[in-house]
Image (cartoon, rainbow, N blue to C red):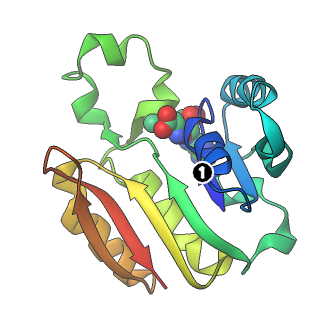
Amino acid sequence: MVDLGTGSGAIALSLAAERPHVNVWAVDRSPDAVAVARANLAGLAGSAATRVRVVEGDWWGGLPAELAGHIDLLVSNPPYISSGEMAELDPQVRDWEPRMALEAGQRGTEAIEAILSEAGEWLAERAAAVIELAPHQAPEAEHLARQAGFVAEVRADLAGRPRTLVARR
Ligand SMILES: C[S@@+](CC[C@H](N)C(=O)[O-])C[C@H]1O[C@@H](n2cnc3c(N)ncnc32)[C@H](O)[C@@H]1O
């Protein structure tokens, strides 16, 4: 499986720890995030640590070409704040998180679109993609996923808000 925009590696490392047979590629464009994820990987116990690779790169571009068509699961919590929304963001988030972790572009869905547009080349048959988004982005994200050839739906989080795109080939 692949975690695109892994940040500290929280999702990638958790999945490796929870699922004893998965191999995980964790990708981030930020060298600082990669360093943190690698430090966290060093603290991971047992066999999970041997099944995670943390690499620096731009979304799918961080992966070796031979993985194309062989990935069973994509997870991503990408940046999804629009440039206009940045000013209204809670200062506790805006002033402490790196901008690259938050701001996606003018629309807010640019990163989701970039990930979905190439997903078809990398995912195996019957693979799934699970991507976090903001509630108001649900219709556009479903549209982008269908345009990329997926069957897609947005599922609610525990508070009942539409927050997760689940797409299947
Ligand atoms: C919202 S944070 C999520 C971090 C982590 N996955 C989590 O859930 O805590 C988004 C991450 O995407 C990374 N990112 C932004 N643009 C990227 C790109 N073009 N390619 C790869 N990673 C990128 C950021 O550096 C940041 O670590």
32 sits to left or right of 165: right
Q: Relative to 75, say whether 116 is above or below.
A: below
Please identify the quarter of the rendering in which residue 23 is found. Answer: bottom right
96 sits to left or right of 41: left
Image x and y of residue 65, in percent: 84, 69
Image x and y of residue 20, in percent: 71, 56
SS for dot 1: strand
The amino acid marked with disc number 1 is Leu
Tell me if the residue at label 1 has its CB under 8 Å from ligand 1: yes
Q: Residue at x 41, y 32 (%)?
A: 102
Quadrant where the N terminus sits is bottom right
Q: Residue at x 34, y 63 (%)?
A: 165
Q: Nearer the viewer, residue 55 or 113?
A: 55
Q: Residue at x 56, y 63 (%)?
A: 74
Circle 1 is placed at which residue position?
4
Image x and y of residue 168, in percent: 45, 80
